[in-house]
Image (cartoon, rainbow, N blue to C red):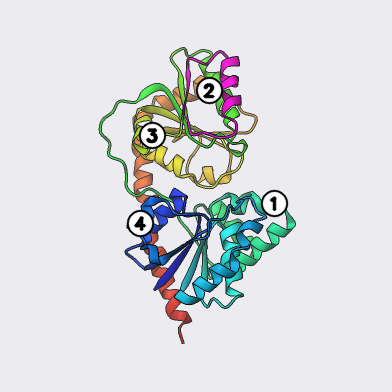
Amino acid sequence: MRLVLIGDGESPHLLKWARALQSRVDLWALSSRGFLPGFDACIPTAQRLALQSAPRFEGGNVALLRHLPRAAAWLRRIQPDWLHAHYLTSHGTLAWLSRHLGVRAQLCGSAWGSDILVTPLRSRVVAAVTQRVLRACTLTTSDSRHMAQRMYEWGAREVMVFPFGLDALPADDGTPKDDALFFANRGLEPIYAPQRVLQAFAAVAQDWPQARLVVAHDGSLAAALREQARAAGLSDRVQFTGRLAPEAQADVYRRARWYISLPHSDSVSVSVLEALAHGCIPILSDLPANHELVNSAVNGLILAADEQLTRASLDALQARSNDIARDNRDWVRRHALFEPSVDAFVARLKQLTAEASP
């Protein structure tokens, strides 16, 4: 079964899909930009096409669509069974339109979150295109039940729901948790509300002198956040690390007791799954997908938009921290490992391929 991944080859998320699919299908890839070096071990150069465009994933990707004739000609030559588009408002549109230029392949799509929950709400045109793409897909995937319901409302035919999970459960090496260490590693961009993360930490830090926060990642709000921490008198208790290498990030996960992620919009986040797998107690914003992971005050906290984080709420969880860490790791083991989900996805594609054959 020949499948073409269509997405951003410079994204580690698409590389993760490539690594999972390489032994299961005849895998090819079309990238809107270039390819990370890791693709060399997954897909031969002869089976990849890099358009080297500069797409804007919030929609309006005229720069990407200028490459449609070239992309369609390449796809016609290789005659795939499936076009597997990642991020539907951009790459899904490219795949959908290529079928109007003679590419005879079924279309499947993987929604990444904002392409369903945010971007289509900004423009009627983008919303209409997203609906067309969803209706054209024989199969789609979603990483949360909440997002899957939105996709069905917009015309999706069949949605498989599984987290964009972990490759493996991290080993528990016995590293002791630091009960006063908080970790946040979402992008420093408005959608992830990092200002609120600092505000939540500041509220707790007032009467907890030992409390410290590590803020990983980078983004357009980095300078403003450093100033916010300075103004709150927390410069020596908030560490901004920038992007961390995987090993360094895993080390913080292992040591941190608390993990904070308070975005305005989100589906099931890989970062939250990583935190659960490392035994962190999550503090999350009040979003439907987060309720699929956390029962507030039981295995973490859900903060309403106008709710302040308190030391008392953390103390109640701290008293059961070992049990919470064990249960959260077990949930990831049972529900959020990627390989079993990819097996089921490929099995369904093969079934649909057989059904479509003469």
Residue picked out by circle 2: 201
| Residue 283 x/y as whole percent | 50, 32
Residue drawn at x 50%, y 47% as measured from the top left: 268
Q: CA distance from mark 4 to mark 3?
A: 25 Å
Q: Nearer the viewer, residue 208 or 21?
A: 21
From the viewer's perspective, tell me whether residue 204 is left or right of residue 319: right
Q: Amino acid at mark 4?
A: Asp
Residue picked out by circle 4: 40
In the image, farthest residue toward the left: 173
Q: Are marks 2 and 3 in contact (CB under 8 Å)?
A: no
Work out whether mark 2 precedes mark 4 in sequence or the reverse, and give the earlier one. 4
Q: CA distance from mark 2 to mark 3?
A: 20 Å
Residue 43's place in the image compared with 169, above or below, is below
Q: Secondary structure at mark 3?
A: helix
Residue 251's place in the image compared with 33, above or below, is above
Q: Secondary structure at mark 1?
A: helix
- Residue 62, label in figure: none
Residue picked out by circle 1: 121
**Foreground tag (4 vs 3):** 4
| Residue 213 x/y as whole percent | 47, 23
Q: CA distance from mark 3 to mark 1?
A: 33 Å
| Residue 12 x/y as whole percent | 43, 49
In the image, farthest residue toward the bottom: 358
From the viewer's perspective, tell me whether residue 219 is left or right of residue 3: right
Q: Amino acid at mark 2?
A: Phe
Over which residues does the magenta segment extend? 216-241
The answer to whether residue 157 is visible is no
